[in-house]
Image: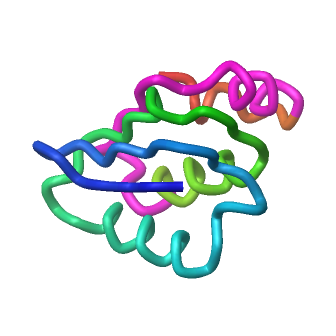
Amino acid sequence: MKSEVRNGILHISGDVTVKTVTSAAYTQFEQQCRLKEIEAIDLSGVSRADSACISLLLTALRLKPDSISLRGIPDSVNALSELYEIKEWVTP
């Protein structure tokens, strides 16, 4: 998993899975979410995603409940959000 901030958007790319979201990657993501300039998270660069990606999105929504939008959510994450009955939380 790779995360970087560009123009107020937190871009996530690569595999976002339980194997790739390490403690260090999660901590970095959380710190990036806390930045005042972050207005959106773009997941269009994600190649594979599982429940770890859901965890990241819920973290972002918890940190910025009224000020962050989600973009490019992978189909696998949409399917999991339906399964977990949280689709209304993560649907842009």
Measured from the top left, where is residue 1 in percent x and y?
54, 55
Left/right placement of residue 79 relative to residue 62 reads right
Image color mode? rainbow
The residue lying toward the viewer, choosing from 7 and 89, is 7
Asked where in the image residue 84 lies, by quadrant, the reply is top right
Q: How many marks?
A: 0
Left/right placement of residue 23 relative to residue 41 reads right
- At 68% across and 36% down in the image, what residue appears? 48
- At 30% across and 68% down in the image, what residue appears? 34
The residue lying toward the viewer, choosing from 88 and 25, is 25
When the figure is inspected, residue 27 is found, relative to residue 59, above or below; the finding is below
Measured from the top left, where is residue 33 in percent x and y?
35, 61
> Is residue 27 in the magenta section?
no
> Is residue 76 in the magenta section?
yes
Asked where in the image residue 52 lies, by quadrant, the reply is bottom right
The residue lying toward the viewer, choosing from 35 and 23, is 23
When the figure is inspected, residue 49 is found, relative to residue 27, above or below; the finding is above
Measured from the top left, where is residue 26 in percent x and y?
54, 70
- At 74% across and 26% down in the image, what residue appears? 76
When the figure is inspected, residue 16 is found, relative to residue 18, above or below; the finding is above
Left/right placement of residue 18 relative to residue 29 reads right
Measured from the top left, where is residue 89 in percent x and y?
60, 35
Find the magenta span and give its range.
62-83
Q: Residue furthest right?
A: 83
